[in-house]
Image (cartoon, grey):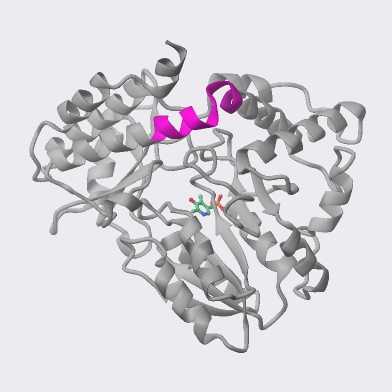
Amino acid sequence: MTHRSGRHFLQIPGPTNVPERILRAIDRATVDHRGPEMARLGREVLEGLKAVFRTNQPVIIFPASGTGAWEAALVNTLSPGDAVLMVETGHFAALWSRMAYRLGLAVELLPTDWRRGADPAAVEARLRQDLARRIKAVCVVHNETSTGVTSRIPAIRAAIDAAGHPALFMVDTVSSLASIDYRHDEWGVDVSVACSQKGLMLPPGLSFNCAGEKARRAAEAAKLPRAYWNWEEMVAANRSGFFPYTPATNLLYGLREALAMLQEEGLANVFARHARHAEATRRAVHAWSLEVLCALPEEASATLTAVMVPPGHDADHLREVILERYDLSLGIGLGKLAGRVFRIGHLGNFNDLMLMGTLCGVEMGLADAGVPHHKGGVDAAMDYLCGRSPAGIRAAA
Ligand SMILES: *Cc1c(COP(=O)(O)O)cnc(C)c1O
């Protein structure tokens, strides 16, 4: 079978569905990246991004996936052998720490059971022991995409402050930015890391660092080699709307459209929409008698839900059946969760009926694949959604 009729459901937690408006915005002749139109576009998107990060600090754009922005955050601010404290909340945190290790940093990992977020008390206790102030950065993933657990960033900031520790605070906000409340300035984050293909609804290819004043001061003394990722060259060229090397011009048109869409909906409404779809999804999972991987309700992610399959069943087989029969892609179990969980992405360009279609696909697939469950997850989600109009509609009424 080569042609599949109807629309494919891409419900992995990134890359996410790209809205028509953004596809149309990208679909145009490429412009001169040293010309006047680029200067206008560059200034517009660099300014617009600040509203999404909730910052007055510069946001830096790299033509790269999120992994590039991880590297940029580390190499701009740290020196060989510097100690970094990283909380291993899941697969993405583990990848970031592996990168830090490869770059020659002395990585200290605070483990978790991959079902909880970063523990502020554990961070505070470790920092209090560091009397010699060897730890130069604390790195946390805000929304751990492999587990569906959201860490409480303001509480981690408070823990660093309570310990009176001067380490930089770096946060991966890749799968939370523009979907879950995030405030770079107010929450005292020094470097935020993000990319284009999740809440920003763009194709992969852009990544971001938001760099606060303390981080940029650290960059002046930092000794790790950096060339492509150099912040200061970027910030200098960005003042006039340009970039030191060729930016991903067409994606920047898409970014301008994404920023306009977020502004039209209103960030508060965007966050409420994500929270509502996440709650409906969890009600479906509970009605199926399956278990959500996230252990604490207050840390459950608004952008994705990781669902455990019963012992003796293979989550990858379930995903294959669902893809084959219903043309619906779900997220795989990553790292040590391989085969044990599947992940439902409910972020980005998304609405009630897209969620219901997704949950129908999962419920039918559970039956097809012979995974023990109760029926009625779809009904539970409908009951929840029906009574509650989306925040956007309520605000307009
Ligand atoms: C997607 C993602 C990344 C970046 O991955 P890339 O494949 O390099 O774009 C980093 N951190 C988290 C939490 C993610 O979800």
Relative side of 149 to 51, left or right:
left
Residue at 71 percent of width and 56 percent of height: 212
Q: Is residue 3 visible?
A: no
Relative side of 275 to 108, left or right:
left
Point out residue 274 in the picture as x, y percentages from the top left corner. Answer: 40, 34
Relative side of 216 to 138, left or right:
right
Report which quarter residue 320 is drawn in: top left
Residue at 20 percent of width and 36 percent of height: 284
- The magenta-colored residue range is 261-274
Report which quarter residue 12 is drawn in: top left
Q: Is residue 82 visible?
A: yes
In the rendered structure, does residue 369 fall within the stretch colored magenta? Answer: no
Point out residue 384 in the picture as x, y percentages from the top left corner. Answer: 23, 27
Residue 32 or residue 359, whichever sits in front:
359
Residue 228 or residue 171, whichever sits in front:
171
Q: Please, what is the dominant secondary structure of the magenta stretch?
A: helix
Report which quarter residue 335 is drawn in: bottom left
Q: Looking at the image, which residue sits at the far bottom?
A: 132
Point out residue 225 in the picture as x, y percentages from the top left corner. Answer: 78, 71
Residue at 42 percent of width and 43 percent of height: 13
Point out residue 253 in the picture as x, y percentages from the top left corner. Answer: 71, 28
Residue at 63 percent of width and 19 percent of height: 24
Quadrant that contains the C terminus = top left
